């Protein structure tokens, strides 16, 4: 028990457990309970706000770090491609009768590698900037977008798994069916793409390679072909 001042009549030494103030009849106990509940509510709101702000700062920090790393990656490949492109042009300009042929080939190769690196990261920086802008504006909207991407990825994975299962069941059916099938698929998946569209290779799959390379063709000894990725082994 503690002694407090009555908020109504300002008299001192009123018990906080008293139902009413003995001087003015103000409901002391009820007032104390409501004040305590309000204080707890305010503390809870403040705690949640601070947690939400900390979470927002963590997300923004991670997005900025990822964007900066991607930017460095793009700058590196752009500088690489420009330098080797300049070397290609220079080597062509000073080359006489193939005197710089090796340098031309090497610089051309590295130049293509550089421009390929830029192409592979194309668009990702723009996506990161969009994500960062949305997160800075409304973190809950950003989380909804991320969750939507996760759900879409899960749906694609489920769809791919169902498609592979159907391919496997169809392959098993072609193996066990007594009908004269044009194509019988194997129940072992392709070692390259994992699909079940594996069949024996045909002459049509090898003829162009054999016609060009002759007995040196690598496809002569390849007995299987996947109709999904088109690879043979």
Image (tube, rainbow, N blue to C red):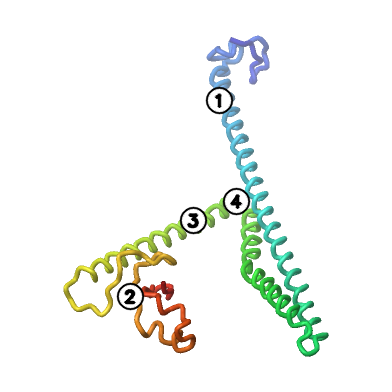
| Residue lying farthest to the front in this orientation | 215
Question: Which of the marked residues, 3 or 1, is nearer the chain's N terminus?
Answer: 1
Q: CA distance from mark 2 to mark 3?
A: 39 Å
Question: Is 58 on the left-hand or right-hand side of 231?
Answer: right
Which dot marks residue 34? Answer: 1
Residue in view at x 39 percent, y 63 percent: 160
CA separation in Å, label 1 and label 2: 82 Å
Question: What residue would you read off at disc 4?
Answer: 139
109 relative to 53, above or below: below
| Dot 1: element | helix
Q: Callout 2: helix, strand or loop?
A: strand
What is the C-alpha distance between the residues marked 1 and 4? 33 Å
Q: Quadrant of residue 1?
A: top right
Which residue was labeled with disc 3? 150
Q: Nearer the viewer, residue 181 or 20?
A: 181
Task: Return the residue at label 2.
Answer: 200
Residue 184 located left or right of residue 209 = left
Q: Nearer the viewer, mark 2 or mark 3?
A: 2
State the image quarter where residue 129 is shown: bottom right
């Amino acid at each position: 028990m503690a002694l407090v001042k009555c908020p109504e009549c300002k008299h001192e030494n009123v018990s906080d457990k008293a139902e009413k103030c003995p001087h003015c009849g103000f409901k002391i106990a009820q007032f104390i309970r409501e004040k305590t509940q309000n204080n707890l509510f305010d503390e809870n709101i403040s705690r949640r706000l601070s947690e939400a702000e900390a979470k927002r700062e963590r997300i923004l920090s991670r997005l900025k770090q990822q964007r900066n790393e991607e930017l460095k990656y793009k700058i590196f490949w752009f500088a690489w491609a420009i330098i080797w492109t300049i070397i290609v042009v220079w080597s062509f300009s000073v080359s006489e009768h193939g005197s710089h042929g090796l340098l031309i080939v090497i610089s051309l190769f590295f130049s293509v590698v550089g421009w390929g690196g830029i192409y592979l990261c194309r668009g990702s920086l723009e996506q990161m900037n969009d994500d960062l802008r949305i997160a800075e504006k409304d973190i809950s909207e950003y989380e909804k977008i991320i969750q939507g991407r996760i759900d879409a990825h899960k749906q694609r994975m489920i769809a791919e798994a169902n498609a592979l299962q159907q391919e496997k069941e169809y392959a098993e059916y072609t193996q066990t069916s007594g009908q004269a099938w044009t194509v019988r698929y194997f129940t072992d998946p392709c070692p390259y793409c994992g699909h079940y569209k594996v069949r024996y290779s045909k002459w049509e799959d090898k003829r162009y390679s054999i016609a060009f390379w002759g007995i040196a063709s690598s496809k002569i000894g390849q007995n299987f072909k996947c109709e999904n990725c088109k690879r043979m082994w």
